[in-house]
Image (cartoon, rainbow, N blue to C red):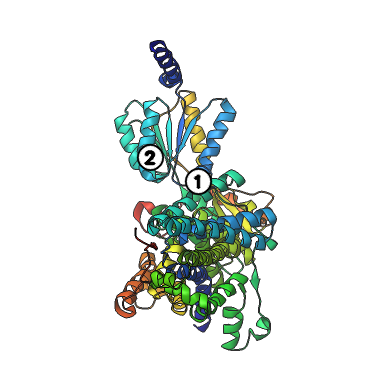
Amino acid sequence: MNILLRAASLVAAMLLMPVAMSPALAEPALVYSVGGKFDGSFNEAAYRGAEAFREKTGESYRDFEIARDADSLPALRNFANRGYAPIVAIGFNQAEAVGAAAKAFPEARFSIVDMVVTAPNVRSVTFREQEGAYIAGLLAAMASKTGTIGFVGGMDIPLIRRFLCGYRQGAASVSKDVRVLFNMAGDTPAAFADPARGAELARSQIARGADVIIQAAGGTGIGVLQAAADAGKLGIGTDSNQNGLHPGKVLTSIRKRVDAAVLDNFLDELSGEWTPGVHVLGLKEGGMDWVIDANNRDLITADMEAAARRAEADIAAGRIIVHDMARDGSCAP
Amino acid sequence: MFDTLILILDSTVRLATPLLLAALAGLYSERSGVFDIGLEGKMLGAAFAAGAAAAVTGSAWAGLAAGILVAIALALVHGFACITHRGNQIVSGVAINFLAIGLTALLGQDWFRQGGRTPPLSGDGRFTNIQLPFAEALRDVPVIGGLYSELLSGHNLLVYVAFLAVPVTWWVLFRTRFGLRLRAVGENPAAVDTAGISVTWLRYRAVICTGILCGVAGTYLSVAQSAGFIKDMTAGKGFIALAALIFAKWKPVPVMFACLLFGFLDAAAIRLQGQEIPGIGEVPVQAIQALPYILTVVLLAGFIGRAVPPKAGGVAYVKERT
């Protein structure tokens, strides 16, 4: 009995060993936002970044999906406790948890995407979404035959408003007469998961004359693109490349390179160059981009492409300043 | 102005359809004395099954069949817990909601690897809009043309099914023997039992009816209105349908009007967003979105009066105390 017990504890100790040893390895870790790894959008981009890291370096990483905001802090603490680094948290809703975990584990290294957390051991990565939206607005205004374009947002939060503001400014750069219709799907996170409502909002905008509609609404946006395609109008995708959802009916997709943010974080750690601080990524840094592929090649004329590339270069060089509405709360370009 | 009104009403019909189907579904169950807050979960399960089946087979009808089957299965689980085992009906309903949320996301991810979505549907995989005869010809006739070709024509099959279900439900409940017994079992199951009719079997049949209609409602969401299932796509519609059911005092025709009212407020809110209103300026989005709820409270408090549920609702029937 005694021997058995001792053998069992030995086995247990051996099983526990890798955990105790892991601090020396400093494996990176990733905590997805609510919505899960395969949301076809934001979290999935983070997952792709981590997978790219694995392919590139052959190193492994750990990840965790939270079901609600309250799960975030325990997940972060758990990873910090086991010595993972850096620990990358995806999404603005994890900011508070990252702040608390960074305080509790001053030796650990954290990153947050889409929000700024000020702490000596946190790297914050945010995006200038308005710059990508500017390009979308420009292309939409050029592609529109009716002179009316639409915007369907998800939950009414500053981030989505900022996107709308950039979109308006981009459209206005083509012509002052372009009318921009906009709708927000709701005031709760459910507004990011209601395609039926998205479709209805898009139909209502189409009835009012819109012929190019951008979605900034996650799952709700799938309905927006569907309704636009059904009516023979054009949609614009966001976050991931959605051109292939309705080939020939999606003008372009504005990508937010969360994957690049995650990959950079992991690679910097590997090369020992990881530093805390605030990183703001826009068109210039490749943090935002727009997609031309086989599905939308025929929709983008040479004029449109040239104008968009020019605007891209002007924004990167600082000749065009896209207004950041989160800074002063008003959208006056 | 008239055109705008027609478009709002057109949108109303589309938005009210899933509510109407779910509320009528709840009507059968609740009238028989089985409270059902699992409408949301059954719709979600059906939406997933319909989306998945339509994606795999390429046929919207296969989707409809799968949606109805899954909703009936979930309804029978509810029935088994509440009728056979006399479990708490609210708890069972909540359990079904959670089960549907979790299971659809899990199976969706496992089968299709698209983040809990089902592959997008096209062609025969969807119920497309039906143009009623002469809709095109009448389009330019004033008033009637707009009403007929915009409002009545150009919806998909399930919209017509939903509105046909209203008179059918009324007829079944108030003009057939089955309906009389179903209502009686919700008011006084002991009396029905004394007459030699099985309370259990009647209630089971009622929840099966609920399953069928929830199945159609879910199918409408994923195969007719949208083109594929998306995680949590019911977005609370089952609960709004439940509110409409109570609002309408468990009667089929008022249920239709309650659902149309909710749909209309929603459609108007969509239309008014970002619009300039003379004298006030642009109304904030939040104010417009709160409007349906404010009106609901006002109507409930001021005009509807007391809603009395079926007397035996929520109580499992115990044949004999020993």
**Residue type, mark 2 in image:** Ser
Residue at the spot 38% in from the left edge and 67% down from the top edge: B313
Q: Chain of mark 1?
A: A
Left or right, B263 with respect to B55, comes to left
Secondary structure under the numbered disc 2 in the rendered image:
helix
Q: Closer to the camera: disc 1 or disc 2? A: 2
Quarter assignment of residue A187: bottom left
| Residue A109 visible in the picture | no
Q: Residue furthest front?
A: B322
Residue A321 x/y as whole percent? 45, 51
User: Crowdedness of circle 2 by 10 Å Cα count: few (<14), some, many (20+)?
Assistant: many
Residue at the spot 50% in from the left edge and 46% down from the top edge: A42
**Dot 2 corresponds to which residue?**
A72
**Quarter containing the N terminus of chain A:** top left
Residue B272 x/y as whole percent? 43, 72
Secondary structure under the numbered disc 1 in the rendered image:
helix
Give the mark nearest the N terminus, 1 or 2. 1
**Residue type, mark 1 in image:** Phe
Residue at the spot 42% in from the left edge and 27% down from the top edge: A84
Q: Residue furthest top?
A: A3
Q: Chain of mark 2?
A: A
Residue at the spot 49% in from the left edge and 76% down from the top edge: B179
Quarter assignment of residue A332: bottom left
Front-lying residue, A201 or A301: A201
**Dot 1 corresponds to which residue?**
A42
